[in-house]
Amino acid sequence: MRGKYGFDPYMALIVAAAQFVIGMGASWGQREFRVPLVGHPYGFALLLVGPLAILLHRRFPLLTTAAALGASDLFLAGGYAYGPSFISPGVLLFLLVTRGKRLMAWIMAAMTLLSFLTYAWLDGHRDLFHSVWILTFIMLFMVVAELVRIVRERRAERERIAEEEARRQASEERLTMAQELHDVLAHNISLIHVQASTALHLIDDNPEQARTALSTIKTASKEVLGEMRSVLNVLREGAPRSPTAGLDRLDDLIERSGMDVTLKRVGSRPLPPQVERAAYRIVQESLTNAARHAPGSSVSVRLEYGERELTIHVADTGATTAPVLSEAGSGNGIPGMRERASALGGTLVAGPLLINGGTGFQVEARLPLPEENS
């Protein structure tokens, strides 16, 4: 109902129509002891002051409220009917309260009460009941306005909190997507690098094995391009994404790694999506580290589904080069795995592992699980 320049034309029009209609009805009902409106342009002009005040109220709240109150007093003093002139001052007092100008509203309400009591006294209504009735009506009206203001402010606060929560969740989703994209890129690019090196080394002496390495490169590059396209589309559209990484894709991950990987599952139970996603990424990053720092090694992956936690154990047999310690390296793989485990209240330990006189590397993560419903 607010106009382009801060006006309230629709509200002013409604109040004007109400005052004129009620004024005509009240004038006819009180025709025996009040001045009739018909044939008195002065009375209609006074009834028009209130709607004009509502029209300009946003720009001049104090002046317009005082003008409407003055017009109401002049209307009563002119001997016109009770009723119609009270609408505009009431609407303006209500607007003052709901628009945050509470002190001004209560001052103007006190002035309204004083003017009405004065007129009632001069008009012969000098009984206590009449004065108490006027006081009660104005106080009740102001209390209702305050209640409406409180309800509006609380609703606005709830909307603000909901909006902030939505922005926070969107930021967390984008952070999760960035972490997912990092893990996918790190794994597949490392896999591509290892397989490309293998293909270059064997292309002359063992073309069939080189062909297998090139096929692995093709598959990995296709996956990483698809994952990047998916995440970038989500970032453009701003819609939430359901992560696709899950332990049901673990066999495909192992097959694409191009390494000698043994997978063993102990037990089985449904997992929360966030735990399943974290477990998949931890295994993926562990295979990435093995492919990068221990090419040609054998890797064992063990998943133990307990009642209260999921244990993930990934170990490689090592290569001829020295293993990468848990705090070394050029990337954020192990710290990223720790962050994933910590975010779920779990732990992750990574470090060297002595196997048959050689030095391998192991990663062990423990992720807490909710109790199963009986």
Image (tube, rainbow, N blue to C red):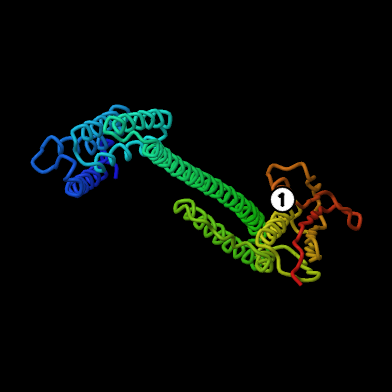
The residue drawn where x is 25% and y is 39% is: 85
**Is residue 98 in view from this perspective?**
no
Question: Which residue is at the front of the view, 21 or 101?
Answer: 21
In what element is the residue under mark 1? helix
- Name the quadrant containing residue 94: top left
Q: Quadrant of residue 215?
A: bottom right
Q: What x and y, as percent, mark residue 277?
A: 66, 59
- Image coordinates of residue 2 in percent, x first then y, are 29, 42
Q: Furthest-right residue in view?
A: 357
Farthest residue, direction left:
39
Residue type at mark 1 is: Met
Tell me residue 31's x, y (percent).
16, 45
* Residue closer to the observer: 87 or 293: 87
For label 1, count other residues whose C-alpha is less than 10 Å away and answer few (under 14), some (14-19) or many (20+).
many
Nearer to us in this view, 253 or 172: 172
Q: Position of residue 164 (x, y in %)?
A: 52, 44
Split into 4 quadrants, where in the image is the N terminus? top left
Query: Could one spot residue 181 in this view of the protein?
Result: yes
Position above or below: 215 against 111? below
Residue drawn 75% across the image and 65% down it? 260
Left or right: residue 122 versus residue 45 is right
How many numbered marks are there?
A: 1
Residue ID at (50%, 46%): 163
71 relative to 137 in the view: left or right: left
Dot 1 corresponds to which residue?
A: 337
- Nearest the eye: 265 or 243: 243
| In this view, 259 is above or below 289 | below
Q: Quadrant of the C terminus?
A: bottom right
Q: In the displayed structure, does residue 188 sit left or right of residue 129?
A: right
